Amino acid sequence: LSLTSFIKLSVVLMIVRNATGLQQVPSNMILMILALFLAVFISMPVFSAALAALSESDITPETPADFIALWRAGIAPFQAFLGENTTPTHLMFMVDVSNELWEGSGMVGTEDDFIIQVPPFMISQLTEAFEIGFLLYLPFVAVDLAVTGILMAMGMQMVQPNIIAVPFKLLIFVFVDGWSKLVEGLIV
């Protein structure tokens, strides 16, 4: 899952749920299943390329070197996907940190090392998720502020704004076909 967009999808879905003001609807399980299937859907070309690369290789795994060669053939499509979806600054930071940590061990970190590519990819996905989540959160905050302002103007300080704001947020979200638009935006 860490080699797919699952991280970004799950975080965005959780942020949207929190923005609506609902505590457990939809449940964590439903959001994670949706994120899982969307991640698999998005990553199918990568999975297919990895399987094709493995089936096209003429290597029979008999020695450790054969297993390493198979690993490299199968992981190459994932490395291409990671490279396309990783922020270069995050990748360079990880290369620099790896070379500092590994100094004196004889190992040198490069941008092509799989073990170095995964953490920056995950950080990039988290960064994108928070950027998307922030933009999605703003309209819901505007509804909260409008409801609070109206209640205060009417002198209804004792009424909790969430009681009034949540139905309006749900109405707006359903009216604009929020789930479909959200999934469409995350896939494309």
Image (cartoon, grey):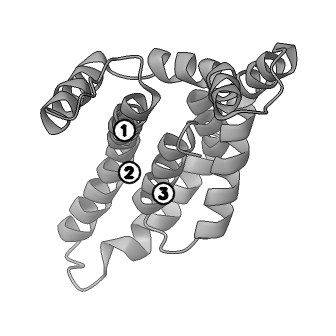
Q: CA distance from mark 1 to mark 3?
A: 21 Å
Q: Are marks 1 and 3 in contact (CB under 8 Å)?
A: no
Label 2 sits on a secondary structure element that is: helix
Label 2 or label 3, whichever lies nearer to me, is 3
Residue 4 position within the rendered picture, expressed as x and y whole percent measured from the top left: 58, 36
For the residue pair 163 and 82, the one nearer the viewer reads as 82
Quadrant position of residue 55 = top right
Q: CA distance from mark 2 to mark 3?
A: 14 Å
Q: Residue at x 29, y 24 (%)?
A: 109
Q: Residue at x 23, y 20 (%)?
A: 92
Label 1 or label 3, whichever lies nearer to me, is 1
For residue 110, say whether it is visible.
yes
User: For the residue carrying disc 1, how many other residues have a C-alpha within 10 Å: few (<14), some (14-19), or many (20+)?
Assistant: some
Q: Earlier in the sequence, mark 1 or mark 2?
A: 1
Q: Residue at x 58, y 55 (%)?
A: 171
Q: CA distance from mark 1 to mark 2?
A: 32 Å
Q: Amino acid at mark 3?
A: Met
Q: Amino acid at mark 2?
A: Phe
Q: Amino acid at mark 1?
A: Pro
Q: Earlier in the sequence, mark 2 or mark 3?
A: 3
In which quadrant is the C terminus drawn?
A: top right
Quadrant position of residue 77 = top right
Mark drawn on residue 119 = 1
- From what the image shows, is residue 142 above or below residue 53? below
The residue to which callout 2 is attached is 140
Q: Earlier in the sequence, mark 1 or mark 3?
A: 3
The residue to which callout 3 is attached is 14
For residue 26, say whether it is visible.
no
Label 3 sits on a secondary structure element that is: helix
Answer left or right for 186 relative to 165. Answer: right
Label 1 sits on a secondary structure element that is: helix
Quadrant position of residue 163 = bottom left
